[in-house]
Amino acid sequence: MAPITKVSPLAPKTFPELPEIGGVRFASVAAGVRYSGRTDVMMALFDQPATVAGVFTRSKCPSAPVDWCRQQLAFGVARALVVNSGNANAFTGHKGKAAVAAVADAISAATGAAPSEIYMASTGVIGEPLEASRITAALETLKAAAKPDAMMDAARAIMTTDTFPKVATATVELGGVDVIINGMAKGAGMIAPDMATMLSFIFTDAPIAAPVLQALLSTATGATFNSITVDSDTSTSDTLLLFATGAARTRGAPEITEAGDPRLRPFRAALENVLMQLAHQVVRDGEGARKFIEVKVEGAESDAAAKRVAMSIANSPLVKTACAGEDANWGRVVMAVGKAGEMADRDTLDIYFGDIRVAHEGLRDPAYDEATAAAYMKNSQIVIQARLNLGPGSATVWTCDLTKEYIEINGDYRS
């Protein structure tokens, strides 16, 4: 399969400048893992041990790199991260474990990092053994080329069916000192994360202990990466890692060792903002996507119930194809609310497309105008709102439309 070159119409018009983060350097290389004529392996090298946190797929069939990283998190320290695209090294049995071990040994030899300080991730085709030698042969080149200002190139190297690299940045005060948060992500299909997106890596120079990072990350994923869906499918490879180099301590940034430290409040908000930007970019690059759709549910029995209803709407092929066809078919939203399995009452339900109320208390809205609703559906960004009017629960999730291009992309993914 050749990489896709046509950029999503929902792609950002510009990309942010990513400030350098002290203590980490990046490199990428064309190793020929699967693709030809493009980079497909990236490395992040930490000058000193960085603290690390992570969340992973809840799939019962995780990839070999996911198993590896889960084991490493117990140590809470990172010196190197290596990621490849083109091959997920998932459902590869003992061969997959052997490939991970071989790459880890080679990274250790090349960088001096202990195996417990090495993190890996893979994305691409499932079920095909990974040729570890293609990665190990590139490690010396990656080590020699690593530099602080190469994060954007690294983001490009982890793309598969993505049409643009996904990056975000924030600068925020921690104890009166500016610290930086940079993030990258990849993902365009097989997106219903249930933890993160397919792959995402966040870097900061803040001096924050690993248990605190883990608390921050686990909380922040709920309203961000765990609130998006492209096609309702959760990957075997989903990996989200957060690394803190601590380099800002030389500028006076305080060491944070407690999750309840009040000095963390601005950082916590900035981290969630970075994750939200990346999550939205994943949806905007949904395979074949032409519409960015926000689904809001209010008045549910609880927030958890509201989210399940919202995901029922966002994952409905009928809702998504109606959006693709610019059809104001609110009956499909009614269907998705009703099938969610949560408390709902036809006679209290209101549905909106944008600010247009299309259904009210179990009936088509008396003021409904088909032409007005149809005109709204032509927008590239659509808001669908369901008000259940039964309780205090609310939730917002994001998805995209389902087009013929999605079928074309996935129909020949392994070709």
Image (spheres, rainbow, N blue to C red):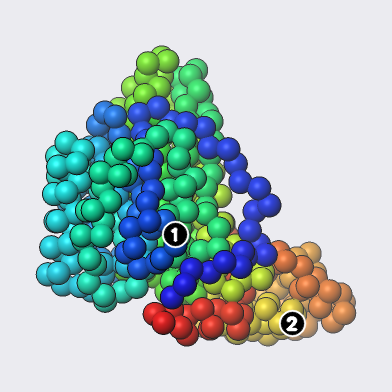
Q: Quadrant of residue 74?
A: top left
What's under tag 2, amino acid-wise? Asp
Residue under label 2, please give it.
327
Residue at 30 percent across and 56 percent down: it is: 121
**Whether residue 183 is situated above or below residue 102 in the rendered picture:** above
In the image, what residue occupies the spot 14% across and 69% down? 95
Left or right: 109 with respect to 304? Answer: left
Q: Residue 30: x and y, percent? A: 38, 56
Question: Which residue is found at the position 47% from the left and 47% from the top?
Answer: 153
Q: Are marks 2 and 1 in contact (CB under 8 Å)?
A: no
Seen from the viewer's position, the closer of residues 27 and 200 is 27
Label 1 environment density (alpha carbons within 10 Å; few <14, some 14–19, many ≥20)? some
Kindly identify the residue that appears in the image at 31 percent across and 38 percent down. 144
Residue 334 lies in quadrant: bottom right
Task: Give the residue type that dot 1 points to.
Answer: Arg
Sequence order check: which comes first, mark 2 or mark 1? 1
134 and 161: which one is in front? 134
**Is residue 145 in view from this perspective?**
yes
Q: Which mark is residue 38?
A: 1
Q: Classify mark 1: helix, strand or loop.
A: loop
- Is residue 237 at least partly visible in the picture? no
